[in-house]
Image: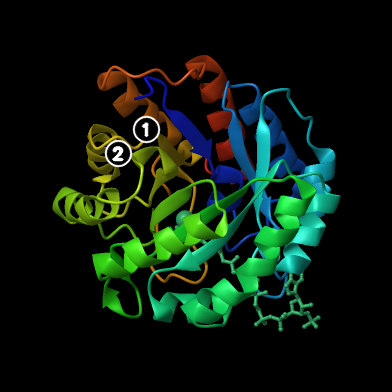
Amino acid sequence: MSSTVTVFEVGPRDGLQSRGDMVPTTKKIALIDALSRTGLRKIEATSFVSPRWVPQMADAGEVMAGIVRHEGVTYAALTPNVTGLGRALAAGCGEVAIFASSSDGFSRANLNCSIAESFERFAPVLEEARAAGVPVRGYLSTVIACPFDGPTDPGEVSRWAGRLLEMGCYEVSLGDTIGAGDTEALDWLLDGLLAHTDAERIAGHFHDTAGVAADLVALALDRGVRTFDASVAGLGGCPYAPGAPGNVDTRCVLEVIEAKGFRHGIDLDALARAEAVARAATNAI
Ligand code: HMG
Ligand code: MG
């Protein structure tokens, strides 16, 4: 099993999508450029979603056009449908992500359709991305609990995660969207999921409501998961999940990775510079 752990930086997308204020495009570009100098190899730069739904991401094309691309860094974006995929491909994204939910309530709030309908929309996205040679990541939200439907059945998580992988996603990122998880709940979830899924095709995406996200990362590492989503300076939330807090802080994830004896390849001084840019961009200095 790999001794290197991948940190998938989602701050420029998940961190900035639900803010009440609009972070100027130039500041988003400065943040992504600072992150590109840290050694991170995966940066989710933006999302090509409906600007009516998420106005904070309306400048996705300009963001992608303005960044300085570093060799070895993949710049990713969310694409809920073929319209989003077309925009992402035109903007030169190195990979894209579809995002499903394991609860119907959140699916309807976030995508305006049921889980089953969302998978119908994802099928052509995967087909067109495959034809374009662009890898597709799959997110699965509300894996522990849903702000509308309550606790999620782990069986549903296994079912929809399996479907994302069968459809051609190279990996499924498990989203604890509202940060409802504790180690017991995650352990139970992974018991079911890892019985028939390779841990290296699973990523952890933990929002840090209760301050236990570091424990969840540690547990998932013990269970063989080797990719974690994180947000620089802990920025984040989801506009369609009431109460969703920021993602687990990138620095916090790096500390857990080191404590567990794994490598991450991130320059901590460069990360501190990116954190300063993130705080300046969000006026949180
Ligand atoms: P809809 O209203 O059912 O769809 O929204 P529609 O096809 O009727 O489109 C509505 C309007 O948007 C139309 O424009 C479309 O052309 C346009 P109008 O005719 O009204 O002028 N449109 C688009 N424009 C640009 N790019 C597109 C696009 N698609 C449609 N891609 C839809 C359905 C999926 C579009 C909408 O619900 C949507 O955009 N949802 C995205 C919500 C979102 O971004 N949520 C946050 C990300 S998910 C998340 O944070 C969770 C995660 O972090 C994991 C976790 O924490 O669990 C990933
Ligand atoms: Mg999220």
Q: Which residue is mark 2?
A: 217
* Circle 1: element type: helix
Is residue 54 visible in the rendered structure shown here? no
Q: Quadrant of the N terminus?
A: top left
At label 2, the amino acid type is Val
Q: Nearer the viewer, residue 214 or 91?
A: 91
Q: What is the x, y in percent for residue 107?
A: 48, 76
At label 1, the amino acid type is Val
Disc nearest the viewer among 2 and 1: 2
Q: Residue at x 42, y 48 (%)?
A: 247
Q: Which residue is mark 1?
A: 253
Of labels 2 and 1, earlier in sequence is 2
Is residue 70 visible in the rendered structure shown here? yes
* Circle 2: element type: helix
Disc 1 under 8 Å from ligand 2? The reply is: no
Q: CA distance from mark 2 to mark 1?
A: 7 Å
Q: Nearer the viewer, residue 33 or 149?
A: 149
Tell me the quarter of the picture where residue 274 sits.
top right
Q: Is residue 268 above or below residue 285?
A: above
Q: Nearer the viewer, residue 121 or 76?
A: 121
Task: Work out which residue is located at the far left of the displayed protein and give it.
Answer: 184
Horizontal side, residue 30 vs residue 7: left or right: right
Asked if labels 1 and 2 touch by Cβ distance under 8 angstroms, the answer is yes
Q: What is the x, y in percent for residue 237?
A: 47, 58
Q: What is the x, y in percent for residue 218?
A: 25, 34
Q: What is the x, y in percent for residue 283?
A: 58, 45
Q: Residue at x 26, y 46 (%)?
A: 211
How many discs mark residues in the rendered view?
2
